[in-house]
């Protein structure tokens, strides 16, 4: 049975003193979120660490994230924040001098600096400048040419709330070998995201805004094309298939998006 507005407000202690409207920055934590984190911290303080138990729960969360995005769990990896996700792409693709990335002027810096830094490899960042705050699909697609490797855009623009037509953008890129990379932190939790329809290659978000989660936890969707092309920027114990064989070094990466989770996950944040 759905909660009433009064019951929902009661889950957020902040509502006792504030009418909070800044979820686009940092959302206040609900009591169930804080309680779940406290359970982990209490167990770690008082009991021997049970990795298998927490891994089962993390697997359940992975499935819930996949369900939310209407995709499969093997395409979901956990990350620290949106910047980490975008940096994974910038650091993990095989770039060549003369390649370019197409982005949007007035994006949040998290979706600019990772691409700007690629100038060290001879990669150009081309910025589309929206007219009247609107991102026109045809206009931004025209900036892409045969050397464009990535088009990076936010699903919802942080400065004015404009919703990008991701489906139309993918159609406009048809026939081009351009990877569509999406910063979804201002969308996931507030808007319906159906990755079975959108056909984006990579999408990432932190949990601290409309997902009502804690700072320092997030996820990325790594689509089939990205799994083929993206190499982990950091490889650790949890990246490989035999992740519990500590003295037999076999560098065989996991076949799915878990290869990007190098070690020591943020259990309290993820759960």
Image (cartoon, rainbow, N blue to C red):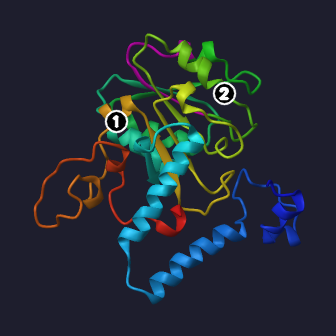
**x%, y% of residue 263?**
33, 62
Classify 65 as above or below 112. Answer: below
> On the rendered image, what quadrant is the N terminus found in?
bottom right
**x%, y% of residue 137?**
63, 17
**x%, y% of residue 120?**
34, 37
Secondary structure at numbered mark 2: loop
Q: Does the magenta stretch include residue 165?
A: no
Secondary structure at numbered mark 1: helix
Residue placed furthest toward the bottom? 46
Q: Can residue 80 be seen from the camera position used here?
A: no
Residue in view at x 56 percent, y 43 percent: 67
Residue in view at x 55 percent, y 14 percent: 171
Classify 97 as above or below 146. Answer: below
**Hey, which quadrant is residue 110 in on the image?**
top right
Q: Can residue 31 be seen from the camera position used here?
A: yes
Residue 238 bears which disc, if any? Answer: none
Neighbor class of circle 2 (other Cα within 10 Å; few <14, some 14-19, many 20+) is some
The magenta span reads: 141-154
Classify 171 as above or below 21. Answer: above
In this view, the mark in front (1 or 2): 1
Q: Does the magenta stretch include residue 152?
A: yes
The residue pinned by badge 1 equals: 227
Q: Distance between the residues labelled 1 and 2?
A: 25 Å
Horizontal arrangement in the rendering, residue 89 relative to residue 7 (left or right): left
The residue pinned by badge 2 equals: 164
Residue placed furthest toward the left? 248
Query: First in sequence: mark 1 or mark 2?
Result: 2
């Amino acid at each position: 049975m759905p909660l009433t507005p009064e019951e929902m407000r009661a889950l957020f202690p902040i509502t006792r003193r504030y009418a909070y409207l800044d979820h686009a920055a940092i959302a206040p934590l609900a009591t169930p979120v804080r309680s779940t984190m406290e359970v982990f911290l209490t167990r770690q303080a008082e009991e021997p660490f049970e990795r298998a138990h927490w891994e089962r729960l993390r697997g359940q969360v992975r499935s819930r994230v996949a369900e939310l995005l209407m995709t499969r769990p093997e395409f979901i990896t956990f990350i620290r924040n949106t910047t980490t996700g975008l940096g994974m792409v910038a650091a993990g693709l095989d770039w060549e001098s003369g390649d370019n990335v197409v982005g949007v002027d007035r994006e949040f810096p998290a979706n600019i600096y990772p691409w700007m830094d690629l100038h060290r490899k001879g990669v150009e960042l081309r910025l589309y400048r929206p007219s009247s705050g609107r991102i026109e699909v045809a206009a931004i697609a025209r900036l892409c040419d045969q050397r464009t490797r990535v088009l990076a855009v936010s699903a919802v623009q942080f400065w004015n709330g404009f919703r990008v037509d991701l489906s139309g953008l993918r159609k406009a890129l048809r026939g081009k070998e351009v990877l569509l990379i999406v910063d979804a932190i201002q969308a996931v939790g507030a808007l319906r995201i159906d990755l079975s329809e959108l056909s984006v290659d990579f999408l990432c978000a932190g949990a601290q805004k409309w997902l009502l989660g804690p700072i320092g936890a997030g996820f990325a969707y790594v689509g089939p094309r990205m799994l083929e092309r993206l190499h982990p920027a950091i490889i650790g114990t949890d990246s490989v298939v035999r992740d519990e064989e500590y003295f037999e070094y076999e560098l065989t990466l996991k076949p799915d998006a878990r290869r990007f989770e190098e070690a020591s996950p943020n259990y309290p944040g993820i759960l």
